[in-house]
Amino acid sequence: MELRCGGVGSQAGGRRMDGDSRDGGGGCKDAGSEDYENLPTSASLSTHMTAGAMAGILEHSVMYPVDSVKTRMQSLNPDPKAHYTSVYGALKKIIRTEGFWRPLRGLNVMMMGAGPAHAMYFACYENMKRTLNAVFHHQGNSHLANGIAGSMATLLHDAVMNPAEVVKQRLQMYNSPHRSALSCIRTVWGTEGVGAFYRSYTTQLTMNIPFQSIHFITYEFLQEQINPYRDYNPQSHIISGGLAGALAAAATTPLDVCKTLLNTQENMALNLANISGRLSGMANAFRTVYQLNGLPGYFKGVQARVIYQMPSTAISWSVYEFFKYFLTKHKLENRTLY
């Protein structure tokens, strides 16, 4: 491969798409890296949104069967026929007893939510990160800025995703009375009201704000270590994304268990806890989990959650960075032609 060293005549120091202003110290780069660095300092809003939507849809589609297993493994009082000891064993059992397509029930509603949610999520993150880095840390990256930007992006993301999460998780549960997303939406709306779609919103935010803060800070930190020039480097995006997702997932599992309980309103568990009506509020969910399962209850499904999140975030970042690179380069080529 042709190498080019710190060229004076080719925008030395490189122009990066994430706004990172650190120069490369005149090191040797290959031609592909230089092409990436010669793109504009920041991609357009439409590029961030398109790349984000593609990343969200592919991430949730590929990992959806594991997500179905995670939801069931977090059940506080599962049916004896729905006891699982491992993700692989659970998938085999679900397919054997309930049919090949059962782990995919609810995928359509998840894809409909994931596209717009991730479009807003990445667009907000990129713009907030660039703005806050300019305020907090004039040279390079500020981890505080990345954490705050991730938290702000989560507010938009969860506002769109929460209703989809409610429908998806009710469809995923063992012996679910709902056979389609539309019938689930109609039933929940008719029996519990529109508020049911946002009953777990505060818990979702309480979980996702620390999750995304850990996720983005870890991802950006790892990128600084293994991809200091911030080139388009698929391997670095996969490794950084996967490790960041695994760490964030393990740390926030207790909140995810409470969110699942609020979303599913698991009847057997609520009856066992002598709760009549609907369970609402994070504090009540925490008390109920402890009442039924003690401290280990907060980590039900942690293995499935990490196995789900690690490849999910790796897929999400690698797809996002690819489309950001591809779309921005395509726009530049079109401008050059005209």
Image: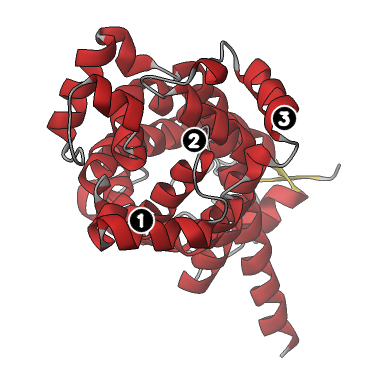
Amino acid of disc 3: Ile
Which residue, given by chain and number where applicable, does mark 2 sit on? 173
Disc 3 to disc 2, how far (Cα)? 14 Å
The answer to whether 166 appears left or right of 332 in the picture is left
Q: Which mark is residue 308?
A: none
Q: Nearer the viewer, residue 28 or 68?
A: 68
Q: Residue at x 32, y 62 (%)?
A: 190
Instruction: For mark 3, give the secondary structure.
Output: helix
Seen at 25% across and 48% down, the residue is 201
Distance from the alpha carbon under mark 1 to that under mark 3: 27 Å
The amino acid type found where label 1 is placed reads Val
**Number of residues whose C-alpha sits closer than 10 Å to that of mark 1, classed few (under 14), some (14–19) or many (20 or more):** some
Residue 273, image quadrant: top left
Residue 174 picture location, percent across and down: 52, 32
Helix, strand or loop for disc 1: helix
**First in sequence: mark 1 vs mark 3:** 3
Mark 3 neighbour density, 10 Å: few (under 14) some (14–19) many (20 or more): few
Residue type pointed to by label 2: Met
- Is mark 3 in CB contact (under 8 Å) with mark 2? no
Marking on residue 95: 3
Task: Assign the N terminus to one quadrant of the image.
Answer: top right
